[in-house]
Amino acid sequence: MRKGIVWFLVLVLSGALAQAPKVDGKIASGEYAKTYKHEKSGITLHWSIVGDTLYLALEGKSKGWIGMGFLPEKTDKKKGADQYLFYMEGGKLVALDMYQTKRTGAPVTDEKEGGKNSILAAAATYEGDTWVVEFSRKLKTGEATDVEIVPGKKMLVMLAHAGKMDPKEEHKKTERWYLEDFVF
């Protein structure tokens, strides 16, 4: 009996029995384990890690697409970044998993670099100019085009948005931010 109780406590404390957020484009109170508000961009990140999956939500204002990316460390600008771009087309969310092949410029879809779209689920609401995007992905996808997310390990998180809903629309330099030493 005691071993069963100890095992249950280990599972609860490790997050193995944590409730996964519902990826529906709405953030309920207490749905995510952690929250971070980036003052300069006005973007708020919410996240939970449940088992081997990262659940993320972005809230922010933008007249166009909104996105984020990951780098294990800052090396050559954005080269090697695992990026996620979200935009609306015909009232429906388009969620792209992208990879930064060059140090600057637009990323390409993972499929163009031999990977695949690693987004497990995505949903969003976009009202006026306010985004709420939720998505999930594995912490470790095993793809060269995706960055492994290690809970507790520092990494670089990138945030960006653009003035138009067109995914080919580049963001202005004033519409991108780097969060150094970010820890999930």
Image: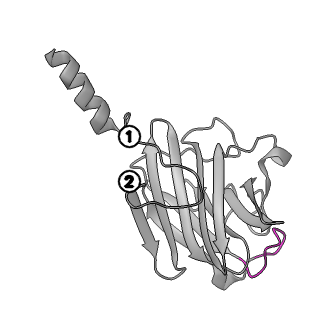
The span shown in magenta is 162-170
Name above or below for residue 72 compared with residue 6. Answer: below
Task: Characterize the local packing of mark 2: few (<14), some (14-19) or many (20 or more) Cα atoms within 10 angstroms.
Answer: some
Disc assigned to residue 18: 1
In terms of image quadrants, where is residue 81?
Answer: bottom right
Residue type, mark 2 in image: Ala
Horizontal and vertical percent position of residue 67: 66, 66
Q: Residue at x 36, y 39 (%)?
A: 15
Query: Does residue 159 appear left or right of residue 32 in this picture?
Result: right
Residue 166 lies in the magenta stretch = yes
Q: Is residue 124 left or right of residue 54?
A: right
- Relative to 67, is 123 above or below? above
Q: For residue 57, what is the image quadrant?
A: bottom right
Q: Is residue 154 visible?
A: yes
Residue at 83 percent across and 72 percent down: it is 166
Please give the residue where the numbered disc 2 appears in the rendered image. Answer: 33
* Residue found 46% across the figure and 43% down from its top: 20
Q: Is residue 75 visible?
A: no
Color theme of the render: one colour
Quote the CA–CA distance across marks 1 and 2.
9 Å
- Establish if 165 lies above or below 173: above
Give the SS element for disc 2. loop
**Three-letter amino acid code at the position of disc 1:** Ala
Residue 91 in percent (x, y) is at: 78, 66
Circle 1/circle 2 CB separation < 8 Å: yes
Q: Is 117 colored magenta in this rendering?
A: no
Tell me residue 158's x, y (percent).
Answer: 59, 66
Q: Nearer the viewer, residue 136 or 125?
A: 125
In-front residue for pair 88/76 = 88
| 79 sits left or right of 147 in the view | right
